Image (spheres, grey):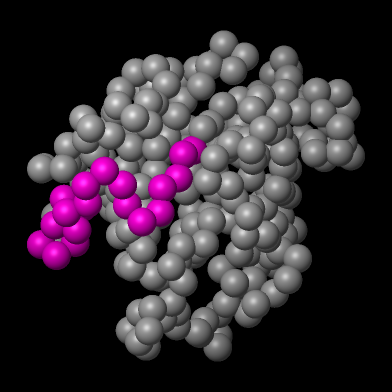
């Protein structure tokens, strides 16, 4: 159970938080330069959030953020799907200010007639589920049905097939946090992203440095998990 201050923050909002995001997710067929052609030929089946199929970088985002390394990720993860149907691969993250109040609506789609219930999991936080429904989210009507009295508090929520879920949370846990579908196949296809919450104004609300004896990963990381469309599971990540 969250502490009383955090709980009442979710209830005091009227219709929207200070940051409102709309996340649409769906499978898609990718081809061309976005699909790691060096491993597979032809079309590829992928998943995405806001039409971005997440590409795992060779350097971890936490280390890149702490050391201010360039070229590992970009901070332009969109609040809205920029191009419908077509997905692009990229390492795009969402930046949040410390203590920012956030509202996110997850919208399931039926692209390729492949709609499913997606268990969306957030690292580093619990959040409040203030609304859900079937069909497409209506920004004028559906917020009026939000439960701001006793919303469910969880860190994973199943977004219904062909439906939507709206969550709220206060970004009061600084750091680098992973968002992803908990269906392993969807996760490895790119239905994930990273949320970076900036430091607060005190040492207690700022990131600690890594320990001096922290070991580094020596194994090469394969960032490509896109499955050949129509092939068997044995083709996944085959190289």
Residue 103 appears anywhere in the view: yes
Residue 184 is situated, as x and y percent measured from the top left of the image, at: 52, 35
* Residue 178, above or below 186: below
Q: Is residue 183 left or right of residue 155?
A: right
Residue 186 is situated, as x and y percent measured from the top left of the image, at: 55, 32
Image quarter in which the N terminus is found:
bottom left
Quick check: is 16 in the magenta stretch? yes
Residue 96 is situated, as x and y percent measured from the top left of the image, at: 46, 63
Quick check: is 235 in the magenta stretch? no
Q: Which residues, given as a range, are shown in magenta? A: 4-23
Q: Is residue 44 left or right of residue 97?
A: right
* Residue 116, above or below 178: above
Image quarter in which the C terminus is found:
top right
Considering every residue shown, the one lying at the far front of the view is 140
Residue 2 appears anywhere in the view: no
What residue lies at 42% left-to-right and 35% top-to-bottom? Answer: 106
Give the quarter of the image for residue 82.
Answer: top right
* Residue 207, above or below 87: below
What residue lies at 49% left-to-right and 57% top-to-bottom? Answer: 195
Q: Nearer the viewer, residue 157 or 93?
A: 93
What residue lies at 10% left-to-right and 43% top-to-bottom? Answer: 149
What residue lies at 53% left-to-right and 56% top-to-bottom? Answer: 94
Q: Is residue 81 left or right of residue 152?
A: right
Considering every residue shown, the one lying at the far top of the view is 113
Give the quarter of the image for residue 192.
Answer: top right
Q: Is residue 182 left or right of residue 133?
A: right
Residue 202 is situated, as x and y percent measured from the top left of the image, at: 35, 87
* Residue 182, above or below 4: above
Q: Nearer the viewer, residue 168 or 234?
A: 168
């Amino acid at each position: 159970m969250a502490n009383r201050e955090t709980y009442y923050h979710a209830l005091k909002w009227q219709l929207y938080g200070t940051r409102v995001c709309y996340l649409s997710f769906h499978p898609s067929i990718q081809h061309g330069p976005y699909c790691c052609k060096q491993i597979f030929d032809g079309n590829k089946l992928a998943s995405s959030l806001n039409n971005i199929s997440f590409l795992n970088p060779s350097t971890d985002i936490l280390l890149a953020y702490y050391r201010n390394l360039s070229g590992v990720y970009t901070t332009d993860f969109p609040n809205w799907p920029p191009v419908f149907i077509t997905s692009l691969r990229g390492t795009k993250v969402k930046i949040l200010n410390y203590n920012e109040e956030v509202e996110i609506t997850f919208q399931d789609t039926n692209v390729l007639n492949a709609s499913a219930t997606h268990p969306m999991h957030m690292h580093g936080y619990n959040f409040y589920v203030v609304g859900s429904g079937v069909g497409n989210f209506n920004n004028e009507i559906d917020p009026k049905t939000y439960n701001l009295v006793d919303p469910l508090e969880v860190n994973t929520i199943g977004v219904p097939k062909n439906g939507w879920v709206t969550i709220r949370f206060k970004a009061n846990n600084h750091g680098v946090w992973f968002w992803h579908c908990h269906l392993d196949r969807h996760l490895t296809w790119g239905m994930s992203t990273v949320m970076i919450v900036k430091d607060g104004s005190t040492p207690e609300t700022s990131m600690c440095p890594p320990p001096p004896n922290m070991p580094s990963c020596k194994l090469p990381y394969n960032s490509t998990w896109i499955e050949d469309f129509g092939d068997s599971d044995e083709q996944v990540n085959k190289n």
